[in-house]
Image (tube, rainbow, N blue to C red):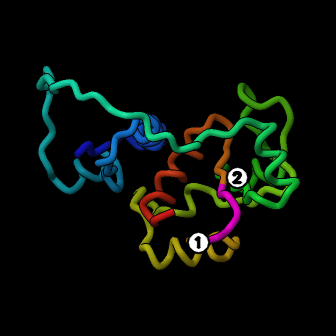
Amino acid sequence: RVVLYDGGHNRTGTMFLALELMGHKKLSFLDGNISNWKKQGFPIEEGEVKEVKPVKYQPSGRDLLADSTQIRHLMEKGDAVLIDNRNVSQHVGHTKRDKIVKKPGRIPGSYNVPLKAMMDNNGIMKSVEELTWLLAKHHIYKGMDEVVITTCNTNSLAAEFYMILRYLGF
């Protein structure tokens, strides 16, 4: 089993997605990142990391990535729900990340479910019940016919959100 964590910079989801695309089947993530681990008094190591024995993987074959043309086509047909995981201010076009985004705003038809809404102030995920309620509020539920596509400026928030969806059984 591989347990992923980071320092609270939304990189765990990207690694989760990459490993899943590679075909890794036993993935977990540390809820609350390394900061919460330390806060709880658990040990931290320094120095060289033990060598890990290489393993061959069979690519998952799952179609996890979509380009802009595919997303537009799916949305026009009503076959996708697009979730924007940025903060509300970016979604409604009041602010933008200057070095990354040329124009403020959102992809037409997208719903805003900020990644931060899925966690408490310490970066710990909300309960399954709370997460399920929050998603249902945006018409996202297990077994839905439409494809759920997550998006943000750099894919890091979207990948974290994808990881949470997988945790919830999507």
Magenta span: predominant SS is: loop
Query: Is 3 placed left or right of 94 in the picture?
Result: left
* Foreground pick, 113 / 141: 141
Residue named by callout 1: 143
Name the residue located 13 percent from the left edge and 33 percent from the top edge.
Answer: 45
Q: Is residue 9 visible?
A: no
Callout 1 secondary element: loop
Q: What amino acid type should be assigned to the residue bearing mark 1? A: Gly
Question: At 78% across and 56% down in the image, what residue appears?
Answer: 110
Q: Over which residues does the magenta segment extend?
A: 143-148
Residue 51 x, y percent position in the rendering: 13, 22
Q: Is residue 129 above or below residue 119?
A: below
At mark 2, the secondary structure is: strand
In the displayed structure image, the side of residue 142 where residue 102 appears, left or right: right
Q: Label 2: which residue?
A: 84
Q: CA distance from mark 1 to mark 2?
A: 20 Å
Q: Nearer the viewer, residue 83 or 6?
A: 83
